[in-house]
Image (cartoon, rainbow, N blue to C red):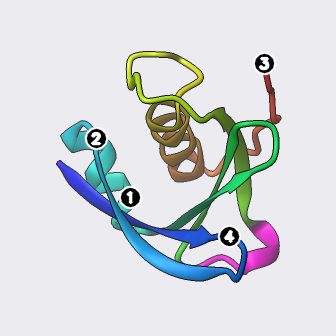
Amino acid sequence: MKIYITQYMRPDGRREELSVEVPDDVGLLARDQIISCEIVPGNTVAIYARRKDQDEDDEEIVIAQNCLDPSDPNSPTSKLIELIRLVADGGNISVETK
């Protein structure tokens, strides 16, 4: 299933819509979430998500490696899927970078 997230572009924060292919169950969970991302220094991507009924202050974040292989467990797609599932479960997550 294709989902759409907001990508904040450097250097001015311009917004672009980005489509990502995820498993159907994850796509259904994402419908109740606000998801965005941005490329940050260190060849990494910061991905943010929260439920639509939450404040921005309650947003969760994961850091992913900026790579193109979606099967890599540290890729943006893998980390996005992990984040969507965790936000849907209502749990807090700890950020881990590699």
Label 3, on which residue?
Answer: 98
Residue placed most toward the observer, 61 or 9: 9
Q: Amino acid at mark 1?
A: Ala
Residue numbers of the magenta segment: 53-58
Which of pointers 4 and 3 indicates the residue nearer the eye?
4
Relative placement, left or right, of 26 versus 15 is left
Q: Secondary structure at mark 4?
A: loop
Which of pointers 1 and 4 indicates the residue nearer the eye?
4
Residue placed most toward the observer, 16 or 25: 16
Q: Amino acid at mark 4?
A: Arg
* Tag 1 near tag 4, CB within 8 Å: no
Label 4, on which residue?
Answer: 10
Mark 2–mark 4 Cα distance, whole angstroms, equals 25 Å
Label 2, on which residue?
Answer: 22
Residue depicted at x 38% and y 26%: 70
For marks 4 and 3, the one nearer the N-term is 4
Q: Residues within 10 Å of mark 3 (few under 14, many from 20)?
A: few
Residue depicted at x 41% and y 68%: 32
The disc label shown at residue 30, or none = 1
For marks 1 and 4, the one nearer the N-term is 4
Picture mark count: 4
Q: Secondary structure at mark 1?
A: helix
Q: Amino acid at mark 2?
A: Val
Q: Residues within 10 Å of mark 1 (few under 14, many from 20)?
A: many
Mark 4–mark 3 Cα distance, whole angstroms, equals 23 Å
Q: Residues within 10 Å of mark 4 (few under 14, many from 20)?
A: few
Mark 1–mark 3 Cα distance, whole angstroms, equals 25 Å
